[in-house]
Amino acid sequence: MTKECDFHGDERRQLIRRIFAAILSFIILILFVIFLIWIILRPTKPRFILQDATVFAFNLSSTGETPSSTTPTPNTITLTIQVTLSSFNPNSKIGIYYHKLDAYASYRGQQISLATELPQTYQGHRDVAVWSPILYGAAVPVSPYLSEILRQDQTSGGVLVNVKVNGRVKWKVGTWVSGRYHIDVNCPAFIKVAGDKGDDGFGVSAPVVKFQFLQSCVVDV
């Protein structure tokens, strides 16, 4: 009786080992197929273009020292800009999910607007997605060292603003969806300004100005 029980116990253990080995082999096979597909397809990062920017307000102020104090008043930037960004998916067999994308304006390495969240988007094979966020910042203080650069910008008649997008992307191959990858987009935009505020600052030359760019952006994934 004991030998029979031991025999059946060994059979069950062997059966469990075989089932476990079969499941493990199946998982490894699936992962290998996914990896093979990934290597063959090699997803290419999307291409972003800054199409245009409509400037409702863009003012840079450098007020220097106040009469009652020797402490310099901070330079400030106020802006309201609506930009049009497009993204092209160059992959013929891979879709792209965009998650938690935030767009904002940057001047000389400093963020000068609030981050505007872009809607989550799925981009099919060789498809184009377009966003038109409004970037807003009111009297944003900038570093004191920028005062001389502001004067140089006034002399040149324009300001180089960088429209940036940060977020996450996921790749889709068939029914398989990858994990999330970080994406950074940097789009330079040269905004023409007029020195119509004296030596203390300058702004755009009209109430509303639209600039056409079709400027390629730098994309890192």
Image (tube, grey):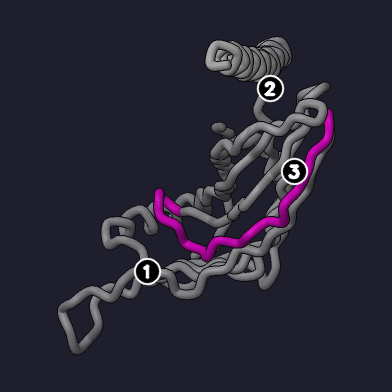
Label 1, secondary structure: give it: strand
Task: Give the residue at mark 3.
Answer: 86
Quarter of image, res 58: bottom right
User: Which of the two discs, 3 and 1, sits closer to the camera?
Assistant: 3
Asked whether, in this view, residue 77 is left or right of residue 46, the answer is left
Of 180 and 21, nearer the camera is 21
Residue at (58%, 34%) from the top-left corner? 219
Q: What residue span does the magenta drawing correspond to?
A: 107-125
Please give the residue where the numbered disc 1 appears in the rendered image: 141
Gap between marks 3 and 2 measured at Cα: 19 Å
Local crowd at mark 1 within 10 Å, few (<14), some, or many (≥20)?
Answer: some
User: Residue 4: which disc?
Assistant: none
Question: Looking at the image, is 213 positioned above or below residue 39?
Answer: below
Q: For the residue marked with disc 1, what is the amino acid? A: Pro
Residue at 64 percent of width and 39 percent of height:
169
Image position, residue 103 (x, y; %): 59, 54
Residue 111: image x %, image y %?
Answer: 45, 57
Q: Indicate which label's residue lies in the foreground, 3 or 2.
A: 2
* Mark 1 or 2: the one toward you: 2
Amino acid at circle 3: Ser
**Which of the labelled discs sits on residue 43, or is there none?**
2
Label 2 element class? loop
Mark 1 and mark 2 in contact? Answer it, CB < 8 Å.
Answer: no
Q: Quadrant of residue 172?
A: top right
On screen, residue 20 above or below 167: above
